[in-house]
Amino acid sequence: MTQPTLASLDKKTLENFYTVLHELTALVAEENAILIVPTETLPQAMVDRKEALGSRYTALTQSLRRRAAAMRASGDLNPEDLEGHIRDLVRGLRENQTLLNARKAATATRVEAVMKALSDREKKDPLNYSAAGDALPRPVSRNSGLRLHA
């Protein structure tokens, strides 16, 4: 069995990079389609896959940087093509961040509205519920209840 050459290793690294780049770009687009629908939730498996692809992307990027000049010189690396694919990923990631920020803001608005409603209710009837949300007995005043005499 022959030893792989540096050029063949470069080609394999570049192929792996493009594969991860395309998978990550497709996954981000799929995630964005889910995030557009306010009631949809991201599956944990998708989040985990994105993290794993992100880690592989980072490692492969570092490998490519070390050998980029040699790959360009050999004609294996087309910088314009690579840059176009990376721009697609960045565009998708920016949209992803915008959608995530919108969801975060919507959640904060809902939480704020619930907290305000609870606060308003507490101001109107401060002894109605415990901190755990359980109904508390209402105090009985001397003037309340059934009166039998006039």
Image: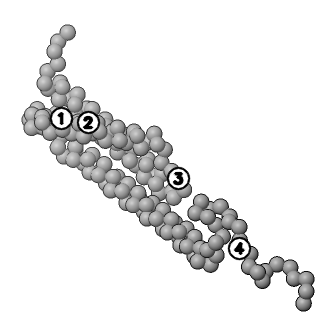
Question: Which comes before the other along the chain, label 2 or label 1?
Answer: 2
Identified by mark 2, the residue type is Phe
Question: Which comes before the other along the chain, label 1 or label 3?
Answer: 3
Q: Is residue 77 above or below residue 95?
A: above
Residue annotated with mark 1: 63
Identified by mark 4, the residue type is Pro
Q: Is residue 82 above or below residue 150?
A: above
Q: Can you give x and y, in whole percent of width and height, for residue 44 in the image? A: 46, 42
Q: Nearer the viewer, mark 3 or mark 4?
A: 4
Residue annotated with mark 2: 17
Identified by mark 1, the residue type is Ser
Residue 75 shows in the view:
no
Mark 4 lies on a secondary structure that is loop
User: Dot 3: within a 10 Å radius of its alpha carbon, few (fewer than 14), some, or many (20 or more) residues?
Assistant: few
Q: Nearer the viewer, residue 16 or 52?
A: 52
Gap between marks 2 and 1 measured at Cα? 9 Å
Residue annotated with mark 3: 40
Q: Are marks 2 and 1 in contact (CB under 8 Å)?
A: yes
